[in-house]
Amino acid sequence: MAFGNAKATAAILYDFGPKILKERFQYGQTKADSQSRLDYLPQTTNPTDPHFMGRALDIVLVAWKPNERAYADALVSLFVRMQSEMHLEAIIYNKVEYNAVGSPSPRIASSTMTAKQKYDYEHTSHIHIQWFDHQKDLSDFAESLVYELQNDSVIQA
Ligand SMILES: [Zn+2]
């Protein structure tokens, strides 16, 4: 399986994105309870999952911490700005989903969901970006993405 755009974008964000992306995210009390903040590998073997299909990337920046959220908001607006150039099918973060043409719509869990389902659905812990299947291996946006990241005052702060 190839992870073209997802892997390339993770590598670019690691090198040129907010420095916090180099730190592991601590979700537990011990050092072992941590994960990379740039995660393109699938957590599932569900063949219809976009991560399993190699066409999605998760960027862990939690919305309930103001500093992480500031970086996440800056990245989301950069991705929306570059949406067609990056061939992004969807961008999801903190209860908002942007479709393939950059239109936002609320992504609010239904009252019948469990707490875990609600948490996963609303994406308050990470940005999810996803490519169209037929465009998931282009990585032709790399130079532009590096340029945008290097010229973003919030991301470079
Ligand atoms: Zn995801």
Image: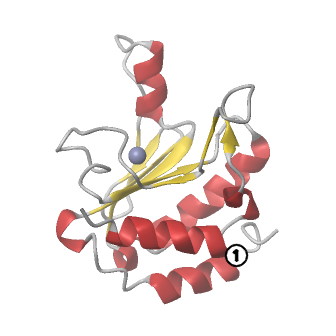
Residue nearer the viewer, 24 or 95: 24
Q: Looking at numbered disc 1 in the image, what kind of residue is underneath it?
A: Asp
Residue 87 higher or lower than 23, as above or below = below
Left or right, 18 with respect to 103, comes to right
Q: Quadrant of residue 15?
A: bottom right
Q: To which residue does mark 1 refer?
A: 152
Residue 82 higher or lower than 65, as above or below = below
Q: Position of residue 149 (x, y in %)?
A: 63, 76
Left or right, 137 with respect to 144, comes to left
Please name the residue shown 70% across and 75% down the image.
152
Q: Position of residue 133 (x, y in %)?
A: 20, 64
Q: Which residue lies most toward the front here?
A: 32
Question: Is ligand 1 less than 8 Å from the beta carbon at label 1?
Answer: no
SS of the residue at dot 1? loop
Please name the residue shown 41% across and 36% down the image.
107
Residue nearer the viewer, 134 or 51: 51
Q: Which residue lies most toward the right here?
A: 157
Q: Position of residue 69 (x, y in %)?
A: 69, 47
Please name the residue shown 37% across and 15% down the image.
113
Q: Quadrant of residue 118?
A: top left
Residue 20 higher or lower than 135, as above or below = above
Assess disc 1: are there few (<14), some (14-19) or many (≥20) residues with their C-alpha within 10 Å of its C-alpha: some
